[in-house]
Amino acid sequence: MYPVYEIDREQAEQIINVEEGFLNDVKAKEIKPAKLSETVSAFANAGGGDIYIGISEDGGKKDREWRGFDDVEAANDIIQTLFQSHPFGNHLQFEYFSCAGLDGYILHVAVKKVKEIVKSSNGEAFVRLNAGKAKIKTDEQLRQLELDKGIVTFEDEWVNVDIKR
């Protein structure tokens, strides 16, 4: 069981209105767990970040509303899928928020930056770009991510040198 915190209305408004960007994202509770694993991959392969699940958003107007899970058990599919995708889960922390007068529980997923490349449930790697994510599609992009994360360094590279001078 993950912790459940009762927060006040001001704190709830801060979550509802959090600015989506490189380090923060909000998702509706209806998000498919496999799709969410892409966002987790993107955060873990960048600087880490926070995902708040249970905040609905009217795409056109960008109006947001607290629409949490009926109970904490209702988020089990999300947590199980994330642990299947990320078996060690050492880069994930889960907690719930509730607020008097607002419906349901918000699931907060804190994603830590880790040294290894983290893939989504479908085996693809993503990186965070501003308030979105980008799939790593080429070997060159994967190599750049390995360099960015320090998995490999330029010091490990062989250099062709003509020794017949």
Image (spheres, rainbow, N blue to C red):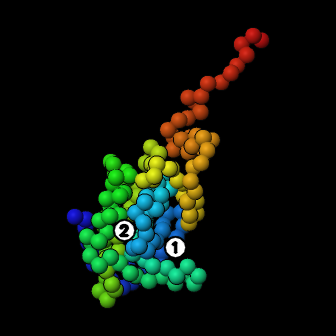
Q: Mark 2 or 1 closer to N-term?
A: 1
Which residue is at a point 48% across and 82% down the rendered structure image? 64
Q: Quadrant of the C terminus?
A: top right
* Dot 2: element: strand
Tell which residue pokes out farthest to the left in this image: 1
Horizontal and vertical percent position of residue 50: 43, 64
| Label 1, residues with CA under 10 Å away: few <14, some 14-19, many ≥20 | few
Amino acid type of the residue tagged 1 in the rendering: Glu
Residue closest to the far top? 164
Q: Is residue 71 found left or right of 68 in the rendered image?
A: left
Seen in the picture, residue 52 relative to 133 is either above or below; the reply is below
**Image quadrant for the N terminus?**
bottom left
What kind of element bears circle 1?
loop
Q: Mark 2–mark 1 contact, CB under 8 Å?
A: no
Q: Nearer the viewer, mark 2 or mark 1?
A: 2
Q: Decide which of 90, 53 is in the foreground and name it.
A: 53
For the point 32% across and 64% down, the residue is 77
Q: Quick one: label 2, few (<14), some, or many (20+) residues within 10 Å?
A: some
Q: x, y (%) of residue 60?
A: 59, 82
Point 57% across, 43% down: residue: 142
Q: Which residue is mark 1?
A: 19
* Residue 44 at least partly seen: no
* Amino acid under disc 2: His
Q: Mark 2 = which residue?
A: 108
| Residue 72 numbered tag | none
Q: CA distance from mark 2 to mark 1?
A: 15 Å
Spot occupied by residue 47 in the image (x, y as percentages of width and height): 49, 55
* Nearer to me, 59 or 107: 59
Residue 99: x percent and y percent? 31, 82
Residue 37 visible somewhere in the drawing: yes
Q: Quadrant of residue 81?
A: bottom left
The residue lying furthest to the right in this view is 165
